[in-house]
Image (cartoon, rainbow, N blue to C red):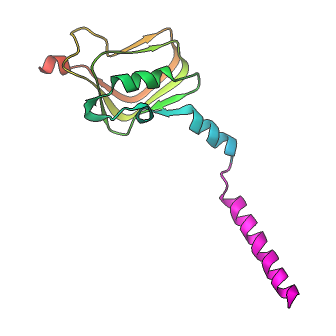
Amino acid sequence: MLAPSFKSLSALGLLLVGASAHAAPASKSSWKAWFLRTHDVRTYGAACDGTTIDTAAIDAALSALSPGDTLVFPASSTCVIDHGLTVSNLSHVTIDGRGATLLGESTMSGGEHMLKLRYSTDLVIRDLTIDANATLRE
């Protein structure tokens, strides 16, 4: 009687080991590299709800970027800024807007920059609308 239960247990053990091995990600290191190199502006406090001022949070997210990193925005959101954003000394960075809009608040002074790029190389900015017309709408 002991032999059949041992065989059943062994078969179950092999099945579980096979299932867990199959469920593991194809490359744990590639997943970890992607996860660690992608920064979401919401992690830094941005609400991107169209009314909250998100300038400080987006500034903090931009400051946290290193070469090879990607900054992402919530898809199709509106992030409001009340003064210009500056991207300085970055290289090999992607800013992925995912259809988001950076909206300048009406308190921004005329002629103030929305997004200033300084001493940066190999930047990719995609799918991000920059709407600086708020000062003209008031």
Q: Is residue 120 magenta?
A: no
Nearest the viewer among 107 and 138 is 107
Q: Is residue 50 left or right of residue 65?
A: left
Which residue is situated farthest in the right direction here?
A: 3
Quadrant (top left, top right, bottom left, bottom right) of the C terminus: top left
39 sits to left or right of 130: right
Please tell me whether residue 133 is drawn above or below residue 22 in the rendered image. above
* Most common secondary structure along the magenta stretch: helix
- Indicate the quadrant where residue 60 lies: top left
* Left or right: 10, with 123 as reference point: right
* Residue drawn at point x = 62 percent, y = 43 percent: 31
Query: How far across and how far down the image is residue 18, in percent?
Result: 74, 65
Over which residues does the magenta segment extend? 1-26
x 57%, y 32%: residue: 37
Q: Quadrant of residue 67?
A: top right
Between 66 and 94, the one nearer to me in the picture: 66
**Within the image, what quadrant is residue 103 found in?**
top left
Task: Determine if the magenta segment contains residue 8.
Answer: yes
Q: Position of residue 62 (x, y in %)?
A: 46, 22
Residue 12 position within the rendered picture, expressed as x and y whole percent measured from the top left: 75, 75
Query: Residue visible at 19% across and 21% down?
Result: 134
Residue 23: image x %, image y %?
65, 59
